[in-house]
Amino acid sequence: MKQILLTMTTLFMLSANCAQAQVTIGELKDPESFSILELEGGGTRGLRLPQLTQKQRSDLDFLGHETEALGLQIFNITTKCVETWNGVEWISLLQQWFAQLFRLLRLLLE
């Protein structure tokens, strides 16, 4: 009995490592083959990012995990802006937009 239980547990653990999941939330449909996650709002709903204050955002502890947190996004309710962790610092969507605008203007003025 112990041998059967051990074999079943081992098989389960091996299959769990190979399992892949694709999910659609909001509609009963299969996700596209290139998607891991699809959100369907039916044209009336959207994605709401986690909302943090400036202090809450600053209190997030990435020490030793800066790279793993790369791309993390929040909505900063203090500054009223979407922010993304770039591995070193938080970059606001507005900062990104202005940086692109200045690059474009510099190219045009050269």
Image (cartoon, rainbow, N blue to C red):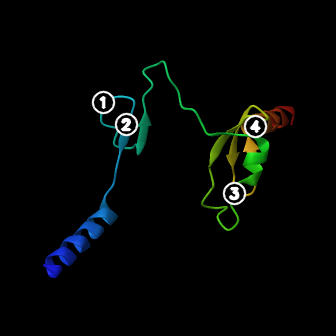
Q: Which residue lies furthest to the front in this view?
A: 1
Residue 24 is marked as 2
Percent of width and height locating residue 40: 42, 28
Looking at the rendering, which quadrant does residue 92 occupy? Answer: top right
Q: Nearer the viewer, mark 4 or mark 3?
A: 3
Residue 63 can be seen, yes or no: yes
The secondary element bearing badge 3 is classed as loop
Q: Do the residues labelled 4 and 1 touch (CB within 8 Å)?
A: no
| Residue at which label 4 appears | 100
Residue at x 62%, y 49% (from the top left corner):
72
Distance from Cα at disc 1 to Cα at disc 3 = 36 Å
Residue at x 63%, y 55% (from the top left corner):
70
Distance from Cα at disc 2 to Cα at disc 4 = 33 Å
The secondary element bearing badge 1 is classed as loop
Q: Which residue is nearer to you in this view: 91 or 11?
A: 11
10 Å neighbourhood of mark 3: few (<14), some, or many (≥20)?
Answer: some
Instruction: Return the disc, 4 or 3, that comes first in the chain's sequence.
Output: 3
Q: Is residue 87 left or right of residue 55?
A: left
Percent of width and height locating residue 12: 25, 66
| Residue at which label 1 appears | 28
The secondary element bearing badge 2 is classed as strand
Amino acid marked by disc 4: Gln
Percent of width and height locating residue 42: 42, 21
10 Å neighbourhood of mark 1: few (<14), some, or many (≥20)?
Answer: few
Instruction: Return the disc, 1 or 3, that comes first in the chain's sequence.
Output: 1
| Residue at which label 3 appears | 87
Residue 90 can be seen, yes or no: no
Amino acid marked by disc 3: Gly
Looking at the rendering, which quadrant does residue 75 occupy? Answer: top right
